[in-house]
Amino acid sequence: MDSNAGMALETAAEPAEPAKARLGRPKGSTAKAQAGKRAAFLAVFAESGVIAVAARQCGVTAQTVGYWRNTDRAFALAMLAAYDASTDRLEHAAYGRALEKSDPLAMFMLKGRRRTVYGDKQELTGRNGQAIEIIVKRAADQEQLTALAETDDSE
């Protein structure tokens, strides 16, 4: 597919701008305006935690936000910080609800935070209560199983 598909044609009065620099930025938009939109997006995203909602409120598409994230490392890091901020807001709201109104929500949060104490327990055994033999075929799986075994032994 042509990399300029969907792009407006240049006019003689407008100097040609490389397609890469224009991608993710509406035609006629200045770098300063884009910086403002990025900052506005990050603020709304930190509040809502939803990319599509924040993008719509700031007058850009989710695809534009994806382009910014993929081409601007500072923006990508700022998005992670905004996502963490929205998760903190969610956790704070859920914590308050759990304490005031909802036993199931409190248990859900405790399971997430202290899985070893409040998490669902499962014990698997083989035939006649015998141990189950697990054959590991990948080194990464072996490392994970070893780490899990060490965690279980230390409790």
Image: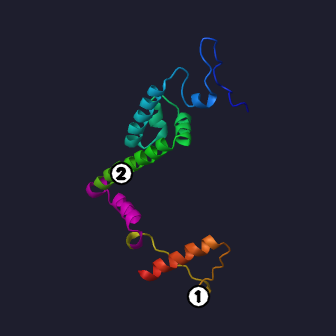
The local secondary structure at tag 1 comes to loop
Which quadrant holds the N terminus?
A: top right
Estimate how packed mark 1 is, as few (under 14), some (14 to 19) or many (20 or more) residues with alpha carbons within 10 Å.
few
Residue pointed to by mark 2: 88
Q: Position of residue 85 (x, y in %)?
A: 37, 48
Give, as a single range, the part of the protein colored magenta: 97-116
> Residue at coordinates 69% horizontally, 31% vertically from top-left?
3
Q: Nearer the viewer, residue 38 or 131?
A: 38
Q: Quadrant of residue 137?
A: bottom right
Q: Residue 106 lies in magenta, yes or no?
A: yes
The type of residue carrying mark 1 is Gln
Is residue 151 visible from the viewing direction of this image? yes
The type of residue carrying mark 2 is Asp
Q: Nearer the viewer, residue 95 or 22?
A: 22
Q: CA distance from mark 1 to mark 2?
A: 44 Å
Residue pointed to by mark 1: 130
Position of 147 compared to 109: left or right?
right
Prevalent SS, magenta region: helix
Sequence-earlier tag: 1 or 2: 2
Estimate how packed mark 2 is, as few (under 14), some (14 to 19) or many (20 or more) residues with alpha carbons within 10 Å.
some
The residue lying furthest to the left in this view is 100
Position of 93 compared to 58: left or right?
left
Q: Position of residue 71 (x, y in %)?
A: 56, 40
Which quadrant holds the C terminus?
A: bottom left
Q: Residue 138 lies in magenta, yes or no?
A: no
> Residue at coordinates 40% horizontally, 65% vertically from top-left?
111
Q: How is the image coloured?
A: rainbow
The local secondary structure at tag 2 comes to helix
> Residue at coordinates 66% horizontally, 79% vertically from top-left?
135
Callout 1–callout 2 Cβ contact below 8 Å: no
Q: Position of residue 66 (x, y in %)?
A: 55, 39
The residue lying furthest to the front in this view is 15
